[in-house]
Each structure stands twice: as C-alpha cells, then as structure tokens.
Image (cartoon, rainbow, N blue to C red):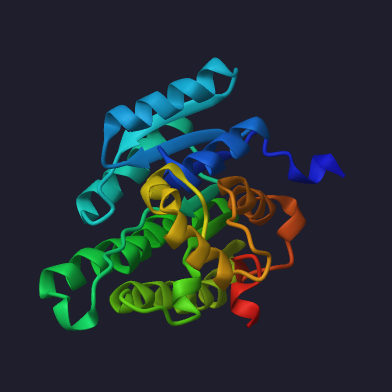
Amino acid sequence: MDAIFDLTGKVALVTGGSRGIGKEIVNTYAAQGATVVIASRNIDDCNNAAEEVIQKSGKALGVRCDIANLEDITNMYKTVVEEFGQLDIVVNNAGVSITKPSVEVTSDDWDFMFNINIKGLFFSCQEAAKIMMEQGNGKIINVSSIGGLKTFKRIAPYGASKAAVIHLTKSLASEWARYGIFVNGIAPGLISTDINTEEIGDERLLQKMLKMIPLRKLGAPSDIACMALYLASDASNFMTGQTISIDGGVTAE
C-alpha cells in the first residue's frame, strides 16, 4: 500500500514552501522521493529549506517568486523546466491575510490579498497547466481555507479570496480533465505553525479558538501535508475538482 504514495521520479513545486504548512508539504514530498522546488519571496529562506532537504538525502531547489508578480511566476516555471525537464505536482500554498473590521479595509488591503490569494494563484495554475498539457498529466493542489467556506469576523476580503480559490479549483478541474490534469484543493482550519505562535501563546485567545473546534485541538502542519500527499499521489487518481476541509470538524457545524 505504501507504494501508492511513492513520489520517486516526480518533480513538485510548492509556493510559500519555505515555512509553515508549505515547508511541511515540501518535507513530506521529499521523504516520499520527490524532487522539490521551494518558492517564496525570500530566496534565502528557500535555499535554507532546500538545504535541509538535501541534508536528509533529498533533492531540492530554492527559487525566488513573488506570487503577486506575473513575471516572477513565468520565470519560476521556466526555471523548473530548464532544471528538471518536467513538472508533475504543483501546490499553490502562498497566501496572505489581513485581519481588521470590514469598514476599515482599504483598497490597498483588498488588492494585496486578491493579487496573491487568487490572481497569482490563477496564473500559477495557468503556467503549470501549459507544461502539464504537453506531458499529458499532472496534479495541481490549491490551498484555500475554511474561511472560504464559513464566515468569520474581521476577515471578509480574505474569506472572499479563499472562496474564489474553491470555485476556481472546480472550474479548472472541469476544463483540464481531458488533458490528464487533476485540480483539487485543501481548506485548512486552525493550524498551529510558527507563523501564528503569538496568537497561540495567548491563553485566552487559544481557548477561544479551541471552543470553535469540535475536536478541541489545533491542527498540525502534518495534517495538511498528509492530505497534500494523498492528492499528489496515485491514491487520488479518480478525484478532481474537490476541496477537502482539514479543520477538526469546524465546517461540520
């Protein structure tokens, strides 16, 4: 059964792959034999994450990419093809959020979130699809959020952008299925990462979060990485257009 999750010989690109959930996905893929390309705005962080993979006998490459910059996206995919000659898996994980009352959201706030969370993600999917169409296969995994499925206060634009990711995932899955391209999504719930250490360290805020979760615990990056592995592997070969919530039961209520 383990063989079905083997990614040996595959090339996987993970945006936002130098920290948090993205880094966990990178390490999970590398452990299963994939060559991983780690992309983010900070090349030093990418190279450090790649070096960690290499030290564990994996194969990795760091690439700088600001997902809000379309030229960066094009150059990122060009680099992947030049270096490896193929692209089998893409995880569009890069994303941003701003928390504030809706009446205080500015036009710049809106553009910042939408340019990264949906516009950049779309054009990343587009560049990936061009390569995968020629190959006749490929898997694209878009990281959304339960904020795209359920309303939460003070994150309205973020939630709207993540809802757009879910719809886009369905649309692209339908359009590209004929080319052997699978497009699925993951909607993480409240996950404990190095990015939200401050919030989790606030006991009052932590207890408030836990009350929202039927399982009464935060998720771990590995919970998301395991789903990303399933969607990247042959285990999901009859599944496309779906976004799976990994949230401890939050969206079940």
- Residue 196: percent from the left, percent from the top? 40, 50
Residue 169 lies left or right of residue 234; in this view the side is left
Question: Can residue 130 be seen by looking at this rendering?
Answer: yes
**Is 82 placed above or below 173 here?**
above
Question: Can residue 189 be seen by looking at this rendering?
Answer: no
Q: Quadrant of residue 61?
A: top left
- Residue 100: percent from the left, percent from the top? 24, 72
Quadrant where the image shows the N terminus: top right
Residue pictured at 42% horizontal, 57% vertical: 130
Q: Which is nearer the eye, 25 or 105?
A: 105
**Is 152 placed above or below 12 here?**
below
Q: In the displayed image of the protein, which residue is found farthest to the left?
A: 107
- Residue 113: percent from the left, percent from the top? 26, 66
Residue pictured at 43% horizontal, 72% vertical: 165
Residue pictured at 49% horizontal, 61% vertical: 142
- Residue 60: percent from the left, percent from the top? 48, 28
Q: In the displayed image of the protein, which residue is found farthest to the right?
A: 1
